Amino acid sequence: MKQKAVYPATLDPIHYGHIDIASRAAEIFDEVIVAIYDKPKKQLLFTPQERLELAQQAFIDYSNIRVALFSGLVVNYVKSQDARVLVRGLRVFSDFEFEFRMALANRKLAPTIETVSIISDERYVHISSSTVREVAELGGDVSSMVPKFVHEALIRRYEELSRQK
């Protein structure tokens, strides 16, 4: 039986830390679905469709990584994809507490789904989407944190937003 895993994330925007976790998961599992949550309870810079397109571009060379949007409870999405594994990335100690609580809640909701945590590569522990957005908004160079096409999308978006003011 092929092992399928779901890596849920907001990806606003996708950065090298996300790419690292997904690509390493793809070495473990036969198929990885990078599942982009369409309506998180936070202010987004990019639309769901834009986040989907940026992620698809990031994983274009990975034959066993698929990118999709999802709504609702992640465990329900995992089941709908006939997957049994939920992949999460851990960067810093504070991530562990949050992810631990989420894994326990998900286990209560769906006992057949396992959560697998992958520790971020040390090159990416300082990167978060909020850091990328803040640095980019202030005109800083985020080229070491995101692929070139994401960097360009960030520049365009912040130029659009500054024209709207």
Image (spheres, rainbow, N blue to C red):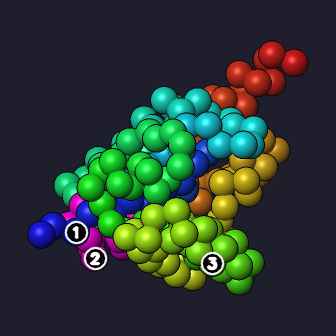
The percent coordinates of residue 46 (x first, y second) are 61, 33
Q: Which span is picked out in magenta?
A: 20-33
Marks 3 and 2: in contact by CB < 8 Å?
A: no
Residue found at x 72% / y 26%? 159
The residue that label 2 is drawn on is 28
Distance Cα–Cα, label 2 vs label 3: 21 Å
Where is residue 72 drawn, in percent x and y?
A: 54, 42
Quadrant placement of the N terminus = bottom left
Answer left or right for 95 relative to 118.
right
Check residue 32 for magenta coloring. yes
Q: Distance between the residues labelled 1 and 3?
A: 23 Å
Residue neighbourhood size for the residue with mark 1, other residues' Cα within 10 Å, grouped as few (<14), some (14–19), many (≥20) = few
Residue at the image point whose x is 37% and y is 70% from the top: 112
Helix, strand, or loop for circle 1? Answer: loop
137 lies above or below 47:
below
Task: Establish if 78 lies above or below 126.
Answer: above
Q: Which of 54 and 147 is in front in this view?
A: 54
Could you tell me residue 90's position as x and y percent? Answer: 58, 76
Tag shown at residue 3: 1
Q: Name the residue under label 3.
A: 100
Quadrant hosting residue 131? bottom right
Amino acid type indicated by mark 1: Gln
